Image (cartoon, helix red, strand yellow):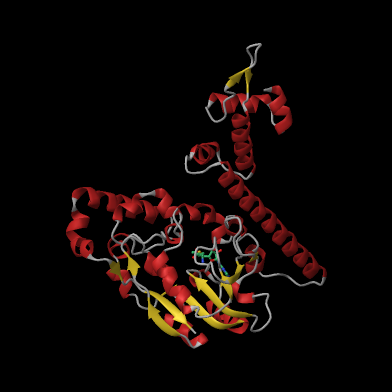
Amino acid sequence: MGRVAELAGVSVRTLHHYDDIGLVRPSARTTAGYRAYTPADVERLREVLAYRRLGFGLREIADLVDDPATDAVAHLRRLRGLLLDQRDRAAAMVTAIDRELEARKLGIHTTPEDQLKVFGAQLYDTIGSAYPATRRTEPRIAAQVWDALGDARTVLNVGAGTGSYEPPDRDVTAVEPSAVMRAQRPAGSAPCVAASAENLPFADQSFDAAMAFSTVHHWQDPIAGLREMRRVARRVVVFTHDDSDTGWLKRFWLTRDYLPEVANLVVGRPSVDRLAHVIEARIEPVLIPWDCADGFFEAYWRRPEAYLDEHVRRAISVWTRVGPEAERRAVDELRDDLSSGRWTERNRELLGLGAAELGLRLLVA
Ligand SMILES: C[S@@+](CC[C@H](N)C(=O)[O-])C[C@H]1O[C@@H](n2cnc3c(N)ncnc32)[C@H](O)[C@@H]1O
């Protein structure tokens, strides 16, 4: 124990505490009868200490390291992403402080907004590590996107995340601002540049096509981002949600009966017609198959029990954005209605459908 404490830079008391609460136990014994850490115990200790240093609480850490779905490599990838994120944020804060010092020297006072901006976390740096659990390629939707890319050989994927919709048979370059998401891209995936849609670091017309999948609603300035895609590529393909058609909020039982707060999240977003107009795109509807493999917000329209699963919800930004109170209430009500049969009574007609139209659109320009 003493040797491990010394190597890890923590006190023996800390190790005793982790042992007492069952977080990391030295599971072996030396020939002299002393308790000792096996290589597996040390691996677990390394994960615990790294999450601790990132500011997680011991209870949260216990859930993380005990999750059977996360192996050592997945933990390393997640930790790497979180650490890069911390580094990026610290660098951004240093730059902002330097700017303010410079401004003060010149007698200029920064606005309160400017002073606070530096602390604003990127949403996907906060929730991104939960993403890969349920977010993956839905082959039928991917086929529609890849078809729209036509004969493009070079493709820029903007807001690429973990790369679920990158066509395997083309030369892809990815753009993704979140360090956590970049760190979770599978080994061997397309090269990924840290940048945002609004400011693409590429020359005019340098790609045959640019695509953006399920990301435009996260951009600070969707119009500027689409103009950038248009600038760097001959063809543009965007998969997004038609938020101006608020009809889907009523058609989808989850928003209609349990989570009406979603309506507040879409207020002020540009309509799909406006987005299409900016890039002169045609609009195609995208149907969601009943067994959709990609766990986005509407994906489980015929599998309501899925929304009771914390892993499913954590991989969908809407659930974080509505806040914990609305989430708790919606999940409790849905659970009750599922067990009483009320959900089935209300939504019986869905059970016979193979695909649903819930406002998803493909813009092709
Ligand atoms: C719902 S995820 C979609 C990821 C990926 N396209 C997919 O389908 O799996 C949204 C992504 O948009 C990224 N994003 C947020 N703001 C962005 C911006 N201004 N420019 C480009 N990407 C952005 C997020 O970091 C996140 O990875």
Residue 107 placement (x, y as % from top left):
79, 71
Asked which quadrant contains residue 244, the reply is: bottom left
Residue 362 placement (x, y as % from top left):
43, 77
Asked which quadrant contains residue 261, the reply is: bottom left
In this image, 73 relative to 307: left or right? right
- The residue drawn where x is 65% and y is 65% is 194
Residue 271 in view here: no
In this image, 204 relative to 336: left or right? right
In this image, 59 relative to 180: left or right? left
Front residue of 324/146: it is 146
43 above or below 99? above
131 above or below 34? below
Front residue of 342/1: it is 1
Asked which quadrant contains residue 98, the reply is: bottom right
Residue 360 placement (x, y as % from top left):
38, 73
Which quarter of the rendered image does ligand 1 occupy? bottom right
In this image, 126 relative to 245: left or right? right
Residue 325 placement (x, y as % from top left):
39, 53
Residue 292 in view here: yes
Single out the residue that lies furthest toward the right. Answer: 105
Query: How many numbered marks does the figure carry?
Result: 0
Front residue of 107/213: it is 213
- The residue drawn where x is 53% and y is 38% is 65
Front residue of 271/211: it is 211
- The residue drawn where x is 28% and y is 70% is 250
58 above or below 232? above
Single out the residue that lies furthest toward the left. Answer: 345
Give the quarter of the figure containing the N terminus: top right
